[in-house]
Image: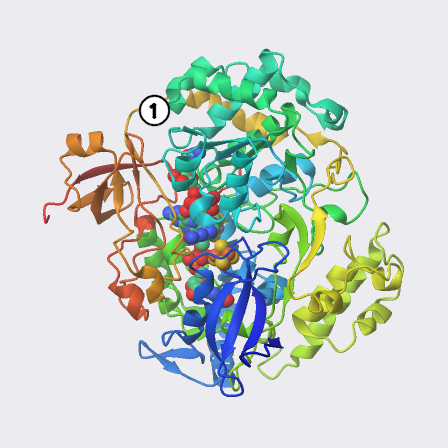
Amino acid sequence: MTTTEQTGDTIAYRTCPLCEAGCGLEITLAPPGGDRTVARIRGDRDDVFSKGFICPKGSTLGHLHDDPDRLRKPVVKRDGHFVEVEWDEAFAAIEHGLLPLLERHGRDSCAIYLGNPSAHSLGPLLYNRTLITALGTRNRFSASTVDQRPKELSAAMMFGSVTVPVPDLDRTDFLVMLGANPYASNGSLCTAPDFPGRLERIQARGGTVVCIDPRRSETADRADQHIAIRPGTDAHLLAAVANTLLTDGLARPGRLAEHAAGLDDLGAALRAYTPDAVAPVCGVDAETIRRLAHDLAAAPTAAVYGRIGTCTQEFGTLASWLVDVVNLLSGNLDRVGGAMFTTGAAGQPSTKGRPGSGRGVRFGRVVSRVGHRPEGFGEFPVTALPEEIETPGEGQVKALVTVGGNPVSSNPNTGRLDAALASLDFMVSVDPYVNETTRHADVILPPPSPLQKSHYDLALLNFGVRNVANYSPEVLPLDEGQPSEWEIMLRLSAVVSGDGVDADITEIDDAAARSLAASAVRDEFGSVHDRDVDELVDAVGDRVGPERLLDIMLRTGPFGDGFGSDPDGLTLDRLEANPHGIDLGPLQPDRIPDLLRTPSGKIEAFPDQMRADIERLAASLDRDWDDSMVLVGRRHVRSNNSWMHNVRVLTKGRNRCTLQVHPDDADRLELAEGSPAVVRSRVGEVTIDVEITDVVRPGVVSIPHGFGQNMPGVQLRVAQEYRGVNTNVLTDEQFFDPVSGNIALNGVPVTVAPSPAG
Ligand SMILES: Nc1nc2c(c(=O)[nH]1)N[C@H]1C(S)=C(S)[C@@H](COP(=O)(O)OP(=O)(O)OC[C@H]3O[C@@H](n4cnc5c(=O)[nH]c(N)nc54)[C@H](O)[C@@H]3O)O[C@H]1N2
Ligand SMILES: Nc1nc2c(c(=O)[nH]1)N[C@H]1C(S)=C(S)[C@@H](COP(=O)(O)OP(=O)(O)OC[C@H]3O[C@@H](n4cnc5c(=O)[nH]c(N)nc54)[C@H](O)[C@@H]3O)O[C@H]1N2
Ligand code: SF4
Ligand SMILES: [Mo]
């Protein structure tokens, strides 16, 4: 922190943890000397990555910190009401409530759900493994299967680890985006602060941006071309683009041809997907699809990027895989201006172990007890959670731990999941709010506010459009008696493992540090191979907790100092001395073959799971796609999933939770602007205000997610006033992508009618 001479104000720099863009913030604290409060937050112009960019949410970290509804102390439910207690009492209540259950019903009887903020906070990021191991349950769930699991899976199949190619936004000439709206979301699985500015610069330098989306989103509106695709048909369209590249002699995998397996069979498998055959499925003319393939091939450099619209749909893994097939065939994978691979300074799987091959990733080794849903990365899909709670028998889930998640809002079929959570024998949440989910908890353990936590974007800097490292210390001190989030994770781990409320968490933390150093030492291709584990841990000095783990990761990472072998290399000390971050340069081309971790040492261009699943795609060609209206989602720059609607400055203005309907559909269905409509799906119904707009294509309606905080027991006074409904009352846990188990939130069949009450 620095104190400016003119005003005496204290200025701190911190990466914003709210979304994947990771913007640098300049935070002015006032009054000097007294109890520090946030006077102002603006973009940090010197941040090496975001260069001053900020969105409306970033400036509200002070509001979040001061929110009177944010829990400062743990609460325990007594006679149906939450009562504030001291920390020791809260952990004792967990021991008392949970351990007998685990003893009686076994470890699998307690499930765990990790939500989105647990990927934006160092405590859960670094210690969720410890908690999961301590719980010893097979019933592990996370928000990944309502989000990006298909892309993780396709990348793991093709490249052998979760190394997702990102579009080289700053150098590409031709960008094709499917199912992404970075003008609202600021980007995802592509860390790019000021994503919108980077898109505008593609256009300014004479390049082209194509946006494929059933809605004319804010991004589509500014793109050079908008292709209004029918929801859920991206795989068909991409298969036709790939097929056109192959049959029109435009495929040029170049130097990657010798590093790719399966390319020979791909042509035959995709032959049926001509632009003419998929046109009626996608609702896009054949000529548009053909031209897209030819434009991609003709562009000096091009990148195809698919995000949540392509993942949370019926053919999510196929679509995610085909994105990179098209990148590969058009000669744009792993080259400047194309789809490239980030070299993260810490925690990147493709920089560990033997370069060029590995064990790959195996999936579906076990299936869930009731619905036989496949495991992926050690988790079951969230669609399995309600039935695991409801269905009696050996291994039934009777207790739940949530960390930074609001599944009642974010998971499909809210009605069913909500009832399932109400039936649990015990529930613990690590969460700052009493919301739709945590109101079911018996104990809530609140983490400190983001300003009271240190930060390093351990997950998201591995998907950056530049190689960047950036660490921020905490800006405000912890409240009296408040443990930091990592300490909460460790104490909870100790309690659930049976070590008791008084267990020494420094021992667990020491073990975590030693285990991390030991795995670096075992890596015969790493910079500290065969060094002494204790020597490395000692070299970190007095640091404990996340800072110690982070320092070990940085120092043994691809830019690290190797604990002495490269004195100019990265350390946490160096990051601390550079509060605006350290730029490690643009993404590097030609990372293949070294980054591959597949057993074959090749890019698996046509993996077995895709060979099997493409049959399902083929069968869908004959479906009557015009059969029903379908629902899609959307995001707005002023909300953040379900949990920032309690910040008044963000919820001001007109109602954003509306049903967008095309004028033709509104006429046909006799819906009037602003009047309520009833939307029904197989699993539920909502009544919501109609917004008639041609931004959606006919046959498609859109409702944003994350609203509907007005459930009984929720303690979010501002959010509860909002006129919103939860769209996941409509989404259906039986409608999912079978390969990944990921939920299909887009393309959900619905009916719409005027509300009788309206
Ligand atoms: N302001 C804000 N920013 C956020 C978030 C937020 O809630 N608010 N959430 C964060 C999170 S967790 C994530 S994962 C990211 C997501 O970031 P993005 O992937 O950019 O997600 P969205 O902004 O929802 O844009 C998805 C687009 O997909 C379109 N779509 C729907 N169905 C289909 C389909 O079948 N095919 C195609 N091609 N398009 C389709 C939708 O109309 C929508 O415009 O955003 C992050 N950033
Ligand atoms: N219909 C529909 N549903 C969707 C989506 C969609 O596009 N459409 N998007 C999906 C996506 S991409 C995602 S990622 C999921 C998100 O799904 P979830 O992660 O389940 O839900 P969030 O709304 O992100 O809620 C985050 C929770 O974390 C808490 N929290 C906030 N900060 C912290 C913190 O620092 N520490 C801890 N421990 N807790 C914290 C909040 O109070 C809240 O309870 O939603 C998915 N659901
Ligand atoms: S774009 Fe994301 S990271 Fe940047 S200020 Fe907004 S919420 Fe924070
Ligand atoms: Mo997400």
> On the picture, is 82 further left or further right than 301?
left
Q: Residue at x 34, y 24 (%)?
A: 625
> On the picture, is 395 further left or further right than 439?
right
Is any part of residue 168 visible from this angle?
A: yes
User: Of 339 and 724, which appears nearest the observer?
Assistant: 339
Q: Name the residue that disc number 1 marks.
A: 625
User: Of 454 and 445, which appears nearest the observer?
Assistant: 454
User: Which quadrant of the view contains residue 82?
Assistant: bottom left
For this orientation, the residue located farthest to the left is 757
Q: Position of residue 114 (x, y in %)?
A: 51, 59
The image shows residue 336, relative to residue 517, as above or below, that is above
The image shows residue 622, relative to residue 115, as above or below, that is above
Q: Position of residue 29 (x, y in %)?
A: 51, 77
Q: Residue at x 49, y 64 (%)?
A: 42
Is any part of residue 512 visible from this angle?
A: no
> On the picture, is 280 further left or further right than 723?
right
Q: Position of residue 169 (x, y in %)?
A: 59, 40
At label 1, which amino acid type do we have?
Trp
Counting the numbered discs, the total is 1
User: Of 700 and 313, which appears nearest the observer?
Assistant: 700
The image shows residue 47, relative to residue 219, as above or below, that is below
